[in-house]
Image (cartoon, rainbow, N blue to C red):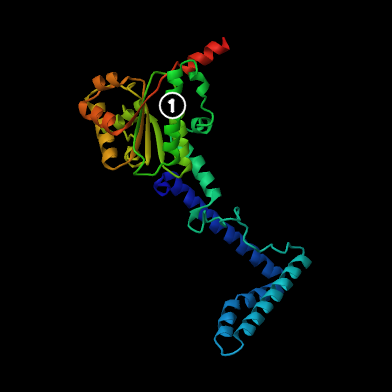
Amino acid sequence: MARENPAFTRIREEYVTKYLKAREEADLRRAEVHLAIPEVAEIDRALSKTGLSLMEASMHGDDVEARIAAVRKTNEELRSTRAELLVAHGYPADYTEVRYDCPLCNDSGFVDTKMCTCMRKKFIEASFESSGMGNLLREQSFENFDLGYYQNDPAAARRMEQIVTRMKQYAETFEAGKAGNLVLFGGTGLGKTHLSSAVARGVIERGGDVFYVSAVSMLSDFERERFGNSAGGETGVDTNRYFTCDLLIIDDLGTEVSNQFTTSVLYNLINTRLNKRQSTVINTNLTQDEFRKRYWDRITSRVLGEYTVLPFLGTDIRAQKLSRKG
């Protein structure tokens, strides 16, 4: 999943550069010390032959373990003398060691075959930005979604508790190609964007490539790619990510201008992602009846038939917040 993400590619290249730079800087410090302390240069030449000495010690008949132990003892003594020489000349004992930023992965980004915590943190931060939501993903989570705004309506409270549980499970168990799809119906201010952001955040933290976009912006990208910009120059638009990301979240579907082109684009995108088993979450303020009337039967049959439908209930949270302030 993550390794196809542009953010991962960029960060991986940064780690390669950082790793090489750390080793290059250590080589420069070693060269400096060799000029200042010739005895250290001699010791380093002797230490560089340790591997050959161990091989020779293991290839001769009896007392192999004793010979190997002798080589290792000599090696330890040389290292001790080397450290003493460095300190005596005003250098730290570890002056020529490679200084990695992360002691867990030595700036490789991986511990064994697993992504190191340092690299995962950078990947998550970069993915928040490339997802299209930035700070919103940092601020909106399942933990700070307040179900208290639904408690004045018992039916809405029960429904929303079920929806939060379902969407949290979706995020926590997300696996590319297997997670399925969600469509969130409900009026404005019922928490669809907040919970979708929480899903995006959870999937990103699991290493998934998420792209979160409004329906208006998405269809504008396809229009500019197809018809060009007003100046007639290069559009700079690449819609490939809509078809390749692990999870596409389309916000506010139904607010876009609807015509034959946009409807065709929407059908192609939904159908292609379904065929490739790529997950999509759709948010819309439309009711299911309004959705059926607005879009082609081919779109509605795929969304209502192959997506998990989550109808939101309640009273506009933004309006509730304003009334409380008043």
Number of numbered discs on residues: 1
Percent position of residue 211, x then y: 40, 36
Say which residue appears at 40% left-offset and 22% top-offset. Answer: 312
158 or 199: nearer the eye? 158
Residue 231: quarter of image: top left
Residue 191, how many percent across, how many down? 45, 24
Q: Dot 1 lies on which element? A: helix
State the residue at coordinates (34%, 43%): 178
**Residue 47 image offset from top left, x and y in percent:** 63, 75
Q: Residues within 10 Å of mark 1 (few under 14, many from 20)?
A: many
Read off the residue under disc 1.
193
User: Where is 61 relative to 224, above or below?
Assistant: below
Query: Looking at the picture, does residue 59 appear above or below residue 28?
Result: below
Residue shown at 59% from the left, 53% from the top = 102
Q: Which quadrant, please, contains the C terminus?
A: top right
Q: Is residue 251 left or right of residue 262?
A: right
Q: Does residue 227 appear anywhere in the picture?
A: no
* Residue 148 seen in this snapshot: yes
Three-letter amino acid code at the position of disc 1: Thr
The front one of 317 and 68 is: 317
- The one nearer the camera, 139 or 166, is 166
